[in-house]
């Protein structure tokens, strides 16, 4: 899906650094308080560090995982100074993200075989789902790929209008029906059109309602089944979009959607306006789903492929 060790351009790195400023400032002010007056990492420092990580929206389970790793490091090395803690945290969080399938990637490449590559995008209203679809379409088109969008969120007129505006802005076709139409029917028509036009990528928007789990599961399952009548392998990717600024609410949304459908990737948006960027670490760890994209601003190019090394470097630089 991507290239290991992809080196960020200076512009992307600057955008990432700027986007994580609030998270970094909050994180390091809390870290400073956690180690205040201490020269070595002892039980008090670890207790304070645990509280700091939880309050930084990393999540309880992930925090305990990180603390256990640091405890093992302290036990092994016998003597660890608080000055070394920054580097240790950097190493352990990078390793954690790597173990959870989140790899360094360019994010905007797709396999040569099995095209069109179909991405079904899910998530609640207000997280930036349709905007993420528009920005993805822009990035894929910049790669020279032919893109088709499907407006299968038929329960809100505003959702259809928004994705049509993005289609016009990016210069890619949008398949839609009347408001209230069967979402699966829209997905079916989208794939038929994409195949006929020789498209490389299809992005399917879906309804952003967190209704009961069974209703959500049934709806998403139907969309998949109907798409597979056109392309047996579709969708190759089911992406959940989460609002990074909601912190623990994003955890709950991830829990709801993982119970309703099989997710293959995550996009975390709105990180530039929040101090809760630590949620990216916890969500990836808890749900074992790779983070593929992060949103760092309103611009067309402010959706970045997630690179764990660059993310952690920016957070700890």
Image (cartoon, rainbow, N blue to C red):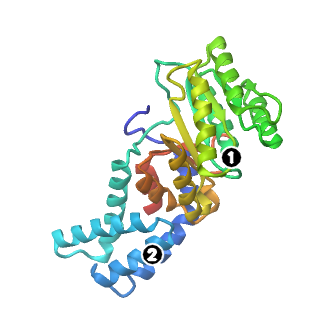
Q: Which mark is residue 125?
A: none
Q: Is residue 130 left or right of residue 230?
A: right
Q: CA distance from mark 1 to mark 2?
A: 33 Å
Which of 12/185 is in front? 185
| Residue occupying image coordinates x 52% and y 55% | 255
Check disc 2 and report the residue beneath it: 52
Is there any visible trace of residue 236 in the rendered image?
yes
User: What residue do we see at 38% from left, 52% from top?
Assistant: 97
Could you tell me if residue 317 is visible in this image? no
Name the quadrant of the C terminus.
bottom left
Of marks 1 and 2, the one in the foreground: 1
Q: Quadrant of the N terminus?
A: top left
Residue extending farthest bottom? 37
Q: Is residue 173 above or below residue 37?
A: above
- Foreground residue among 219 and 194: 219
- Helix, strand or loop status at disc 2: helix
User: Which element type, helix, strand or loop, lies under badge 1?
Assistant: loop
148 sits left or right of 288 in the view: right
Q: Depth check: give the residue in front, 7 or 241.
A: 241
Q: Is residue 262 above or below residue 253?
A: above
Q: Position of residue 163 (x, y in %)?
A: 75, 36
Is residue 122 shown left or right of residue 174?
A: left
Q: Which mark is residue 208?
A: 1
Relative depth, front residue between 155 and 146: 155
């Amino acid at each position: 899906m991507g290239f290991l060790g992809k080196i960020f351009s200076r512009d992307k790195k600057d955008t990432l650094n700027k986007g994580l400023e609030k998270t970094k400032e909050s994180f390091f002010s809390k870290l400073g308080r956690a180690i205040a007056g201490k020269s070595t990492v002892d039980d008090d420092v670890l207790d304070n560090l645990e509280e700091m990580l939880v309050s930084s929206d990393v999540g309880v389970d992930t925090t305990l995982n990180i603390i256990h790793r640091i405890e093992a490091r302290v036990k092994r090395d016998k003597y660890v100074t608080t000055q070394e803690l920054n580097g240790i945290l950097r190493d352990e969080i990078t390793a954690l993200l790597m173990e959870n399938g989140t790899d360094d990637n360019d994010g905007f490449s797709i396999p040569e075989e099995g095209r069109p590559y179909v991405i079904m995008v899910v998530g609640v209203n207000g997280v930036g789902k349709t905007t993420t679809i528009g920005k993805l379409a822009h990035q894929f088109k910049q790669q020279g790929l032919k893109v088709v969008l499907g407006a299968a969120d038929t329960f809100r007129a505003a959702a259809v209008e928004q994705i049509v505006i993005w289609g016009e802005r990016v210069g890619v076709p949008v398949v839609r029906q009347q408001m209230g139409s069967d979402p699966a029917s829209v997905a079916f028509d989208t794939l038929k059109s994409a195949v006929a036009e020789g498209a490389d990528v299809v992005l399917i928007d879906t309804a952003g309602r967190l209704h009961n789990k069974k209703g959500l599961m049934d709806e998403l399952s139907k969309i998949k089944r109907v798409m597979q009548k056109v392309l047996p392998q579709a969708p190759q990717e089911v992406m959940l979009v989460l609002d990074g600024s909601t912190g623990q609410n994003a955890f709950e949304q991830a829990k709801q959607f993982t119970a309703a459908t099989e997710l293959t990737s995550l996009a975390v948006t709105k990180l530039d306006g929040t101090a809760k960027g630590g949620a990216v670490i916890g969500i990836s760890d808890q749900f074992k789903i790779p983070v593929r994209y992060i949103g760092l601003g309103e611009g067309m190019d402010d959706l970045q492929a997630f690179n764990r090394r660059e993310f952690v470097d920016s957070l700890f630089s």
